[in-house]
Amino acid sequence: MCLLLALSATLLVDAQPADVMRRYKHFLTQHVYGGMNTNKCSKVINQRHITEGNTNNCKEINTFILATHEQVRAVCSDGGIPKGRNLYESTKRFPLVICKLKKGVRCPKCKYNGKRSTRTIIVACDRGWPVHFEDSKIVLDLFKGIFQRALMMLSG
């Protein structure tokens, strides 16, 4: 009986609000794909019908996060830093494939070039669920280390 109550409580805590589910699934379709690579941009974007808003126009840029749904969802809790409004920046860097439109105006004639990068991501969250990819940031560890050493030298 106790096990059943514990499982029920876990399901309630992790249950996704119905109004968030649609936005979350749309976010996953557009931005989360662990098997993505730079050569797949055109194929995946066209297969998933990723377009500019509710039009049939080609999207100028689309970013894919090479991670699991759970890893991305963590950005909305302990894996992210609140940035104001409902935005959270990841505390770790994610591998990304950034697809930029090469040619085409309307689907399915959209052709993309892909580029790999590793960056922190900024997502909009709704009640603990990522629902919008806002941006990504390149974190330059090299410069961070140089600045830290310079500050130590100045202070000491």
Image: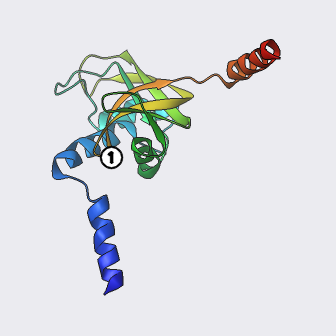
User: Whole-percent x and y of residue 147?
Assistant: 71, 16
| Residue at the far front in the pictured view | 156
As helix, strand or loop, the secondary structure at mark 1 comes to loop
The front one of 119 and 116 is: 119
The x, y position of residue 74, in whole percent, is 44, 47
Local crowd size for mark 1, using a 10 Å CA cut-off: few (<14), some (14–19), many (≥20): some
- The residue positioned farthest toward the top in the image shown: 154
Q: Which of the 4 image quarters holds residue 43? A: top left
Q: Is residue 36 above or below residue 83?
A: below
Q: How is the image coloured?
A: rainbow
**Which residue: 79% across, 12% down?**
154
Q: Residue at x 25, y 26 (%)?
A: 107
Task: Look at the image and tell me in which quarter the N terminus lies.
Answer: bottom left
Residue at left 39%, top 42%? 76
Quick check: 99 above or below 15? above
Q: Is residue 58 left or right of residue 66?
A: left
Q: Is residue 26 above or below residue 12?
A: above
**Looking at the picture, which amino acid does disc 1 mark?**
Gly
Residue on which the image places disc 1 = 128
Considering every residue shown, the one lying at the far bottom of the view is 1
Question: x, y percentage for residue 149?
Answer: 78, 19
Q: Looking at the picture, tell me which residue is in the foreground, 149 or 123.
A: 149
Query: Residue 19: x and y, percent?
Result: 16, 46
Image quarter of residue 99? top left
Q: Residue at x 26, y 35 (%)?
A: 49
Q: In which quadrant of the rendered image does the C terminus lie?
A: top right
